[in-house]
């Protein structure tokens, strides 16, 4: 063995899974050519093996020193001519069996250490097959592909972390492309906060976007629970039950019950539903009725006698255009027509009205698709059973304060459909889904109070991380700030793709959460180049530093060309910013400004 070209030295210390090697004094060059490939001895993050008869142990170089024991270089008292490598043991291979993580038997003093060659790594990573997806090339050997195990990547969840501009979106897009290339039946739903991904998946994805003419993203309000809807409409906090809250709950329940027997997706027994059930109901009609009872005038003075029979109506108005009913003015001095005595809902009626009128909430209350004509089954088919393997839910047009509830709702619908359909042949466990959450720090924080969020998104996504595996849903979070992400989510991440991260708090979070005790590799993340990642965890056989290629077309997230742009001089013009302000007010992309407004809500089926 000593004569083998891969030999580098002998073990001088074994301390749990850390092994120290003294490099052979006869080795004068730190590079070695084996089978025409150049290998560097003692590069951090490279691999070393320890052949022990039929068993070979593998480790990764975590420190290089000229002094034994400490692992740090001592410049004042160098142990002249001696060189030491600290190696973290990571796995073993028995004979020709596949590589296994973890070690059963430890090496001992004087055991030999060898360089790991590309041929060895090929055995470790395994040959390409349907269950593997290529994420990039090994940083230490350019022509060695690194594969991720698709099953573990999806079923055990994953995370891509890195500072802004480190290449996360490009990595996410690469992984999605690779999955789609190899899996004709894949199902991926991508939550795209900034509308970046459409450019990377033209004609390969179904893209839903707010105000889009062809495929508008709509999230019907009636899928909210009563607590969610009441908070959103009138600011009621859960648990509070004033008389008007009780009334609101009853009104919603009655409208849902009435519709429950004529749903497109099939009738539901009205006795079994609650105000929380995701059943279409006509919120405009509910507002209109409240308005009518508060502002009506009557031929009768007593509260009990004030009803539709005694109304002094001029015209009915129109709930769908938010036009209230009109009444004869009441007579001030206690004569007919009498003023309404039912003013319980006066405050809520006004709050609901202002919500319904606000065009920023159109995607909830007045979606292009008439949401009571399309029941929930239609929405689910659109999102997770369309002609493409990837669905991009582009939330870029959603007001910031609604991101939390929107991500929460759409994640919950997908999760619930997988939960209740877990045994159906076309979904659930029989047809898993991967959900990718971009810019996760903005809606999955560990401390909502600091972010003015209410935890809708966090609770829904945590549920996937905790239980999704059993019902066929996997998740991937992508974020710049791992330290701000919910700890429940971090604790369930099986595979970490850590890109350049310089903030020490974020670095420590990844270090603490990453499995395999691969702290020495994770330590490198502040020195990674753009597009490089340390990949550790369940989906990768051996923790690796990987170079991910930039894909074209890629996500629309290029840095601005600061210098080129600043070389040009722009003269102020009165027309400047006009279109931008219109787009800002209408909450539409500039390119869509001239398209007609979303179709008005015309007919109603469930009222
Ligand atoms: N693998 C790569 N190789 C070379 N350049 C890359 C690579 N990946 C991304 N880039 C470049 O780096 C820039 C930022 O990439 P990307 O949008 O993927 O970063 P990000 O981490 O998602 O940033 P943010 O957190 O701001 O969303 C882009 O201009 C892209 O062209
Ligand atoms: Mg990005």
Image (cartoon, rainbow, N blue to C red):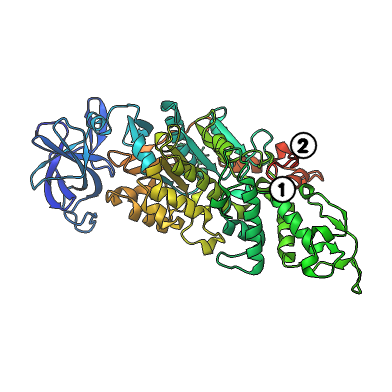
Q: Quadrant of the N terminus?
A: top left
- Mark 2 crowdedness (10 Å alpha carbons): few <14, some 14-19, many ≥20: few
Image coordinates of residue 569 in percent, x first then y, are: 72, 42
Task: Locate residue 206 relative to residue 336 in the image: left or right.
Answer: left
The answer to whether residue 320 is above or below residue 593 is: below
SS category of the residue bearing label 1: helix
Task: Locate residue 437 relative to residue 143 in the image: left or right.
Answer: right
The residue sitting at the bottom extreme is: 333
Image coordinates of residue 210 in percent, x first then y, are: 65, 42
> Mark 2 or 1 closer to N-term?
1
Disc ID at residue 584? 1
Image coordinates of residue 363 in percent, x first then y, are: 66, 45
Most foreground residue, 571 or 153? 153
Image coordinates of residue 532 in percent, x first then y, are: 40, 40
SS category of the residue bearing label 2: loop
Measured in 3D between alpha carbons, the distance from the residue under mark 2 to the one under mark 1, in whole angstroms, is 16 Å
Task: Decide if residue 100 is in sight here.
Answer: yes
Task: Locate residue 536 relative to residue 309 in the image: left or right.
Answer: left
- Residue drawn 44% across and 52% down? 462
Disc ID at residue 596? 2
- Residue drawn 17% across and 32% down? 97
Task: Decide if residue 167 is in sight here.
Answer: no
Name the front one of labels 2 and 1: 2
Most foreground residue, 290 or 396? 290
Most foreground residue, 449 or 579? 449
């Amino acid at each position: 063995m000593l004569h083998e070209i891969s030999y580098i030295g002998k073990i001088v210390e074994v301390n749990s899974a850390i092994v120290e090697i003294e490099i052979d004094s006869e080795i004068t060059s730190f590079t070695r050519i084996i089978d025409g490939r150049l290998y560097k001895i003692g590069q951090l993050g490279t691999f070393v093996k320890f052949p022990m008869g039929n068993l070979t142990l593998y480790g990764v170089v975590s420190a290089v020193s000229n002094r034994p024991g400490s692992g740090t270089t001592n410049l004042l008292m160098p142990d002249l001519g001696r060189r030491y490598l600290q190696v973290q043991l990571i796995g073993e291979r028995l004979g020709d069996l596949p590589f296994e993580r973890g070690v059963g038997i430890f090496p001992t003093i004087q055991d030999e250490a060898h360089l790991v060659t590309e041929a060895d790594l090929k055995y470790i990573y395994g040959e390409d097959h349907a269950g593997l997806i290529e994420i990039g090339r090994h940083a230490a050997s350019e022509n060695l592909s690194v594969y991720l195990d698709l099953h573990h990547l999806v079923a055990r969840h994953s995370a891509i972390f890195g500072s802004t501009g480190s290449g996360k979106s490009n990595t996410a897009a690469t992984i999605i492309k690779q999955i789609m290339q190899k899996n004709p039946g894949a199902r991926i739903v991508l939550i795209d906060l900034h509308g970046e991904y459409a450019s990377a998946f033209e004609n390969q994805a179904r893209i839903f976007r707010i105000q889009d003419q062809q495929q508008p993203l709509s999230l019907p309000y009636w899928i909210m629970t009563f607590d969610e809807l009441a908070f959103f409409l009138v600011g009621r906090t859960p648990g509070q039950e004033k008389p008007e809250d009780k009334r609101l709950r009853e009104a919603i329940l009655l409208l849902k019950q009435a519709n429950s027997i004529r749903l497109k997706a099939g009738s539901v027994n009205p006795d079994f539903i609650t105000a929380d059930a995701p059943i279409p109901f006509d919120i405009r009609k509910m507002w209109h009725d409240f308005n009518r009872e508060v502002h009506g005038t009557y031929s009768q003075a007593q509260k009990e006698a004030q009803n539709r029979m005694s109304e002094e109506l001029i015209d009915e108005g129109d709930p769908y255009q938010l036009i209230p009913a009109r009444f004869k003015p009441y007579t001030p001095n206690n004569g007919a027509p009498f003023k309404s005595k039912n003013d319980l809902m006066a405050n809520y009626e006004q709050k609901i009205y202002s919500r319904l009128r606000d065009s920023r909430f159109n995607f909830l209350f007045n979606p292009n698709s008439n949401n009571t004509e399309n029941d929930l089954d239609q929405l689910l088919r659109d999102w997770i059973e369309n002609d493409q393997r990837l669905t991009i839910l582009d939330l870029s047009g959603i007001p910031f304060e609604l991101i939390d509830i929107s991500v929460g709702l759409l994640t919950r619908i997908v999760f619930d459909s997988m939960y209740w359909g877990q045994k159906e042949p076309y979904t659930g466990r029989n047809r898993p889904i991967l959900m990718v959450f971009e810019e996760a720090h903005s809606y999955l924080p560990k401390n909502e109070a600091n972010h003015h969020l209410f935890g809708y998104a966090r609770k829904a996504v945590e549920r996937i991380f905790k239980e999704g595996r059993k019902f066929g849903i996997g998740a991937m979070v992508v974020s710049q700030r791992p330290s701000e992400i919910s700890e429940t989510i971090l604790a369930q991440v099986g595979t970490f793709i850590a890109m350049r991260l310089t903030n020490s708090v974020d670095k420590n979070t990844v270090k603490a959460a990453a499995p395999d005790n691969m702290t020495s590799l994770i330590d490198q993340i502040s020195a990674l180049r753009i597009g490089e990642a340390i990949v550790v965890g369940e989906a990768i056989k051996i923790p690796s530093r990987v170079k991910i290629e930039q894909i074209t077309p890629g996500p629309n997230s290029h840095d601005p060309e600061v210098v080129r742009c600043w070389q040009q001089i722009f003269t102020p013009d009165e027309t400047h910013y006009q279109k931008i302000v219109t787009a800002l007010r209408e909450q539409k992309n500039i390119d869509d400004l001239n398209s007609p407004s979303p179709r008005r809500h015309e007919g109603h089926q469930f009222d």
